[in-house]
Image: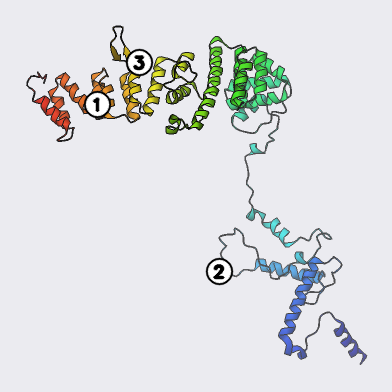
Amino acid sequence: MSRVKEDEDYWNASKCKAFTFDDQDEDGLSQLKESKRAVNSLKAFVEEDDEDWNKVTWSGEPVGSISWSIKETSSINRGRDIKSPGTEKPRSETSSYAFPKPASSYSLGSLFKGKSRQSSFQSLSDDLLETNHKHFAPELRKPRSEYQDYSGEWSIEDSVQRMSKGKVCSLERFRSLKDKLKLLDEAVKLHDGNVITAVLIFMKKTLHSEILFRELKERQDALRHFIHFLKETEDQQLLMDLLRYLEWTEELALCRYREHLNIVDAEQRRDFLKSKCLSLPFSQDDAALVQDHYTLLERQIIIEANDKHLEASGQEIFRRHPRKASLLFMPLVTTLFYSCIYHYTESEGTFSSPNNLRKTFKIPEKLYILTALAARAKLRAWNDIDALFTTKTWLGYTKKKAPVGFHRVVEILHKNGAPVQVLQEYIRLVEDVETKISLGTKYKCHDVVIDTYKDLKDRQQLMVYRCKVDRGSPEEDKIDMILSNTQIRWKN
């Protein structure tokens, strides 16, 4: 009797409840509750501390026991090794490796925290990465030369060759002046501008400027390259120091003169040119150009201020042709064109007069004629153009003369929309006959072409040209009248 009671106490106290037929009525619900409790206990195994090793598995054996470990491990191995022939699933297209599906839902490594206790235990992820990492990320081997240290003990020649090929090469280990100069000489010998620039930048950072200037003075190729580099990088101060050391006075003056480009205000730029640049030791020609630059800017400031006032007061020329930009900082030719547009009729005594600009800056006649022609043609002032080319002979006669050639005059007039009557007048002044006929045909100045063929007594060409004009037009009637004239002795 006592034996039976002890057995009942044992089973009632056991962690695993024995199966009884009394529970069959609620079999589904009890299994669901038991499954939830088991899953919760498994989650607790991963999250709780190491002292909870006395929990049990589905079979009732404590997790962590020797028998549980053997069974769990053997079930995993069976799941990996046993495969039915012909039942292997194809690999997914998006994955290069299919994970093996273990027989048990929970592996030994995921439940044990034994990695800290026993070095032989590993997690499932560690085990997979260790055994199959070549399937996931195969090693990409590089050439052996790529594994070498970039800051290795390269010789000067090898360093220059590596840089010429675009490879990484540290120059910091070349500390002595001798090595740096040899490095520069090798770069110049190679005739590679990128390598020379890299070496010069390294020397600029690591050498005192006077030492660098002294050594570059003995190496003219490297010196010119360094000066060009300083101009491109706009290192104005170092460039001026170098030019001063080399005693290149004219280059130093030009370098100083370029500083005016950074001044935005017109009056401040004018004052800078007057106080800092006019006294610089330029060559004779350059000194005259700098003086003209100062004079032109001073003239532009005066004209701009006066024209702003006239524009605000509503003067007719500014209403008909509004200004599109300021005159300040414009070149001399642009200033002359502006003056021919807005101040063409002014007397020579005013600063804005075209003739005043022509005499002050000694503008050549050809340049003046072309600029004035373009300006007055833009305003369609044909009378001004006629007066521009009319000159008087020493006998008092008048004739038209164009230092640029009348064919150029015709092209500029046509570009600005001159009428046919004006074009014909200047085409007739072209001396070359073929050019005259070509221009007359191109711009449909028929009278010029017809009269030219008549003067040449070329009956055949006149008949050919008759087919090019419109039927019933005055030009056709004129050609018929000339062809029917019996007093003309034709050459063909």
Kind of residue at disc 3? Pro
Pointer 2: what residue?
A: 86
The alpha-carbon separation of the residues under discs 3 and 1 comes to 21 Å
Q: Position of residue 115 (x, y in %)?
A: 80, 60
- The answer to whether one can see residue 407 in this image is yes
Q: Indicate the quadrant where residue 401 lies.
A: top left
Q: Quadrant of the N terminus?
A: bottom right
Q: Determine crowd level at label 1: few under 14, some 14-19, many 20+ residues with C-alpha closer than 10 A.
A: many
Above/below status of 96 relative to 153? below
Direction front: furthest residue: 313
Question: What element does badge 2 sit on?
Answer: loop
Mark 3 vs 1, N-terminal side: 3
Q: Indicate the quadrant where residue 274 lies.
A: top right
Pointer 1: what residue?
A: 440
Pointer 3: what residue?
A: 403
Q: Quadrant of the C terminus?
A: top left
